[in-house]
Image (spheres, rainbow, N blue to C red):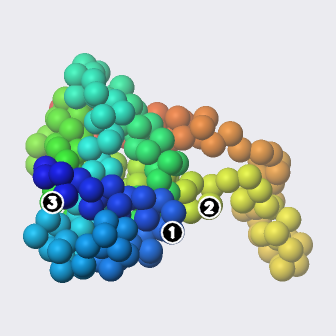
């Protein structure tokens, strides 16, 4: 990667960290680098190319943060480590989930990430014909959880059982009534993330076992 391209991506990521993804434009990045917007095109292409390059850089950080990720023998541990690393990355750069949901896996780093999940599912015994579908399910779950956390949906006070019931007469939310003692408790989001990953692993194991039967 050229030095100028690196400089452009550094500037784009800094803008996203400061202003969010909405603040990233060819003009704002060019201004930060000290060039005209047209001078960016030979290095990153258009705005879509810039966003893809930003996503590729962030996914590359997953492997930098967990350099031994691909060497983890047990596929279950590999999936868990990948999920935790991606979550930590998102906590430092909340805007990245918007890119993960909106951009296709086209850069080398993005394709490498998908391949890591393909390999984990194959190692689990998932039939090759089912691997692409299951990878989409697994990655969408991970991204959805991480996006919910970075967007504020998962956080202190978000269950708010009184707020859920406040606009309706008593007895109209029987499901809420049944689980109210647990809604009223605080949530350990780290523990819930781990528990959800365990359930995800069990689902993959179940599908693999079904295929072997």
Q: What is the x, y in percent for residue 73?
A: 25, 19
Crowdedness near tag 3: few (<14), some (14–19) or many (≥20) residues, C-alpha within 10 Å: few
Determine crowd level at label 2: few under 14, some 14-19, many 20+ residues with C-alpha closer than 10 A. some
Task: Return the mark for residue 90.
Answer: none
Instruction: Identify the residue position indicated by label 2 in the image.
Output: 153
Looking at the image, the residue that sits furthest to the front is 34
**Residue at mark 1:** 19
Residue at point 27%, 51% (across, down)? 57
| Relative image position of residue 133 (x, y in whole percent) | 22, 54
Residue under the image location 30 percent in, 34 percent down: 64
Res 106 label: 3
Q: Position of residue 15 (x, y in %)?
A: 43, 65
159 or 6, nearer to the observer: 6
Quadrant position of the C terminus in the picture? top left
Q: Nearer the viewer, residue 93 or 98?
A: 93
Q: Residues within 10 Å of mark 1 (few under 14, many from 20)?
A: few
Disc 2/disc 3 C-alpha distance (Å):
29 Å
Mark closer to the observer (3, 1): 1
Label 3 or label 1, whichever comes before in sequence order? 1
Mark 1–mark 2 Cα distance, whole angstroms, equals 20 Å
Image position of 146 (left or right of 124): right
Is residue 213 or residue 198 the one in the foreground? 198
Residue 56 lies in quadrant: bottom left
Of tags 1 and 2, which is closer to the observer? 1
The Cα–Cα distance between marks 3 and 1, rounded to whole angstroms, is 25 Å
Query: Which of 169/137 is in front?
Result: 137
SS at mark 1 in the image: helix
Residue visible at 54% across and 41% down in the picture: 193
Can the viewer see residue 48?
no
Q: Mark 2 or mark 3, which is nearer to you?
A: 3
Residue at (77% x, 56% y) in the render: 157
């Amino acid at each position: 990667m050229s030095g100028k391209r690196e400089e452009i991506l550094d500037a784009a990521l800094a803008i996203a960290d400061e202003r969010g993804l909405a603040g990233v434009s060819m003009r704002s990045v060019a201004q930060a680098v000290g060039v005209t917007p047209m001078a960016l095109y030979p290095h990153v292409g258009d705005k879509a190319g810039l966003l893809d390059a930003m996503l590729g850089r962030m996914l590359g950080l997953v492997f930098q943060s967990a350099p031994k990720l691909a060497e983890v023998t047990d596929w279950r541990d590999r999936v868990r480590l990948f999920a935790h690393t991606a979550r930590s990355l998102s906590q430092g750069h909340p805007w990245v989930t918007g890119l993960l949901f909106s951009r296709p896996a086209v850069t080398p780093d993005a394709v490498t990430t998908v391949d890591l999940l393909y390999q984990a599912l194959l190692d689990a015994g998932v039939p090759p014909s089912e691997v692409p579908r299951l990878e989409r399910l697994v990655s969408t779950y991970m991204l959805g959880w991480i996006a919910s956390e970075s967007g504020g949906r998962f956080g202190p006070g978000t269950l708010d059982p009184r707020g859920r019931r406040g606009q309706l007469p008593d007895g109209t939310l029987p499901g809420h009534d049944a689980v109210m003692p647990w809604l009223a408790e605080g949530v350990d989001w780290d523990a819930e993330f781990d528990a959800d990953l365990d359930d995800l692993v069990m689902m993959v194991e179940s599908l693999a076992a079904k295929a072997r039967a």
